[in-house]
Image (spheres, rainbow, N blue to C red):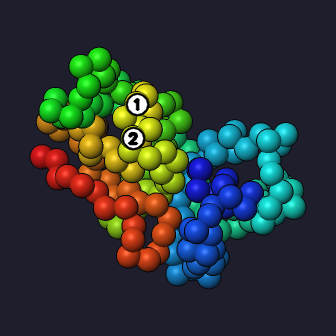
Amino acid sequence: MNVLLRHASGRSGEAESDIETILTEAATGKRRIWVNSIMFAEMRPSAFVAGRFAALAEFTRYLRSIATFVTPDPNCMLRAARLRDVRWQRPAALRRPDEQPRFLSLLDAIQMSSALWVKETAGVADLEFLAFEDFGADEANEGGWLSLLRLQDYADELPVDSDGLAAVRLPRAEPVLRSNALRQSAEVG
């Protein structure tokens, strides 16, 4: 969601041309984009910033023409709830004495659960979850913020066969087609 919303408002930075390529490939049938329908609830008309699209209605028409929408069913939402319950924490050697476990936000858990549904149930083996890294590692370590791109760094003591492990194993990257995509730093399980 954040990738598409930032791109629509012209705030995708150096990834702009890569996102445009991804969207063009989707429009020409060379690539498939999966988007959670909850995105429409995130697009508040009063907060929409004109950029690549003059108006929110133009952007939503465009999305509907190129994307496949996932509407979370009760099983997907229950998985999102389980993902929200996972206690994400860094390895003990890296934790500050007062550092608390982190938790996925509701929207991030729904997005992750939907992506796992597409991969596992719809059978899209090569699915890649795209997201922007909005904070640096130092900023992330100071607060309760949990990076979707770096979940593996907070996967210490995850239960075996958990939804958390499935989320960590899901390929996640910034929307950059060049070789400088964010590398996942640790294998889990």
Identify which amino acid the numbered label 2 is placed on.
Answer: Asp
Residue assigned mark 1? 142
- 5 relative to 154, above or below: below
Quarter assignment of residue 88: top left
Q: Are marks 2 and 1 in contact (CB under 8 Å)?
A: yes
Q: Estimate the x, y position of residue 29 in percent, counting from the top left.
A: 57, 79
Q: Residue at x 80, y 61 (%)?
A: 51
Up/down of 52 relative to 162, above or below: below
Residue type for callout 1: Glu
The residue that mark 2 highlights is 138
Residue 23, compared with residue 13, is above or below; it is: below
Sort mark 1 into few (<14), some (14-19) or many (20+) by Cα contacts within 10 Å.
few
Q: Residue at x 73, y 44 (%)?
A: 43
Rendered location of residue 2, percent (x, y)? 59, 50
* Residue in the foreground of this view, choosing between 49 and 97: 97
Q: Is residue 3 visible?
A: yes
